[in-house]
Image (cartoon, grey):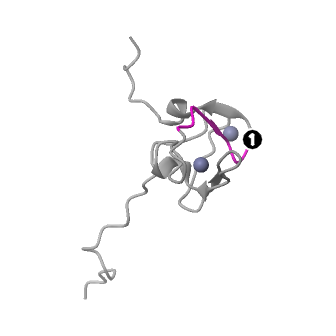
Amino acid sequence: MLDAPPDTKRAPPKDPYQGIRCPKCFWRPVASSRWMCRQPCFHVWNTFDTRGKCPACQYQWQDTQCLACSRMSPHEDWYEKPRGEDA
Ligand SMILES: [Zn+2]
Ligand SMILES: [Zn+2]
């Protein structure tokens, strides 16, 4: 008798933050990670849902602080680039 695991047809949910990591310490954000906007907005959201743009005040963050090492890095640097993209 085949011992098929249940739900084999349903693919596991894709990690929406795949390919995103802190360029300094390689910490990876998760869906529950939260960043806070500057004053007087103080909106709290996951900055990787909006590519660094605050959904409340539309402020575009150029740098993103790591929740693990607390260092700031350019938001674009958080996205892993495919190899060979360097000019
Ligand atoms: Zn870090
Ligand atoms: Zn804001």
> At 28% across and 75% down in the image, what residue appears?
8
> Which of the pair 80/45 is nearer the observer?
45
> Which of the pair 33/57 is nearer the observer?
57
> Which of the pair 73/1 is nearer the observer?
73
Residue denoted by label 1: 69
Q: How many marks?
A: 1
Q: Which residues are magenta?
A: 60-69
Q: Is residue 29 left or right of residue 40?
A: left
Query: Ligand 1 closer than 8 Å to the CB at disc 1?
Result: yes
> At 50% across and 52% down in the image, what residue appears?
55
Q: Residues within 10 Å of mark 1 (few under 14, many from 20)?
A: few
Quadrant in which the N terminus appears: bottom left
> At 62% across and 56% down in the image, what residue appears?
43
Measured as percent of width and height from the top left, residue 16 is found at 42, 54
Q: Main secondary structure of the magenta part?
A: loop
Q: Is residue 35 left or right of residue 11?
A: right
Q: Is residue 28 above or below residue 72?
A: below
Residue type, label 1: Cys
Measured as percent of width and height from the top left, residue 56 is found at 53, 54
Measured as percent of width and height from the top left, residue 61 is found at 57, 37
Measured as percent of width and height from the top left, residue 26 is found at 62, 39
Q: Quadrant of residue 15?
A: bottom left
Residue lying at the far front of the rendered structure: 40
Q: Is residue 51 left or right of residue 84?
A: right
Quadrant in which the C terminus appears: top left
